[in-house]
Image (spheres, grey):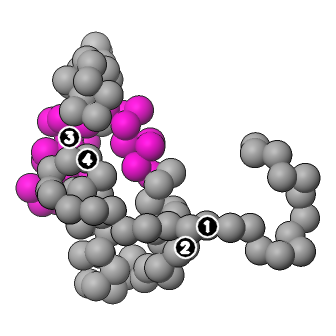
Amino acid sequence: MAERLVQCRMLKKELPGLDRAPFRNELGQRIYNEVSKEAWQSWLTASVKYINTYRVDLASPEGQKFMVKQCSIFFGFEEGDLATTAWTPESGSKGDGAKG
């Protein structure tokens, strides 16, 4: 079966789309129709920063609402500014500073 292609609104080119909508709502359907797997992976990486910075409880309605709004802004479906994230490693953490 051929992979489904979408015109990705973020990467501005035709790329493989998601296998299914990520949410059961209008936003999920728009993402399914207009966002590539590659762009979705970018959101998943960015979303971790929001969860950690704001200690988002994804089980709570407030946490879900916050993340849906950030996702909508991230993909340009909604006007607004993304919440700021200022992640810094904990002092005394092990590692040499190399990204990996």
Specify the quadrant that holds the N terminus: top left
> Disc 1 marks which residue?
87
Between marks 1 and 2 in the image, the one whose residue lies nearer the viewer: 1
The 10 Å Cα crowd at callout 1, few under 14, some 14 to 19, many 20 or more, is: few
Residue 28 lies within the magenta run: yes
Q: How many labels were placed on the picture?
A: 4
Element at label 3: helix
Q: Earlier in the sequence, mark 1 or mark 2?
A: 2
> What is the spatial separation of the Cα atoms under label 1 and label 2, in whole angstroms?
8 Å
Which kind of residue does numbered mark 4 sit on?
Phe
> What is the spatial separation of the Cα atoms under label 4 and label 2, in whole angstroms?
20 Å
> Disc 2 marks which residue?
52
Q: Earlier in the sequence, mark 1 or mark 4?
A: 4
Q: Vertical placement of 99 versus 88: above or below? A: above
Location of residue 25 in the rendering, given as x and y in whole percent from the top left corner: 12, 60
> Disc 3 marks which residue?
32
The 10 Å Cα crowd at callout 4, few under 14, some 14 to 19, many 20 or more, is: some
Quarter-of-image position of residue 63: bottom left
Between marks 1 and 3 in the image, the one whose residue lies nearer the viewer: 1
Mark yes or no: residue 77 visible: yes
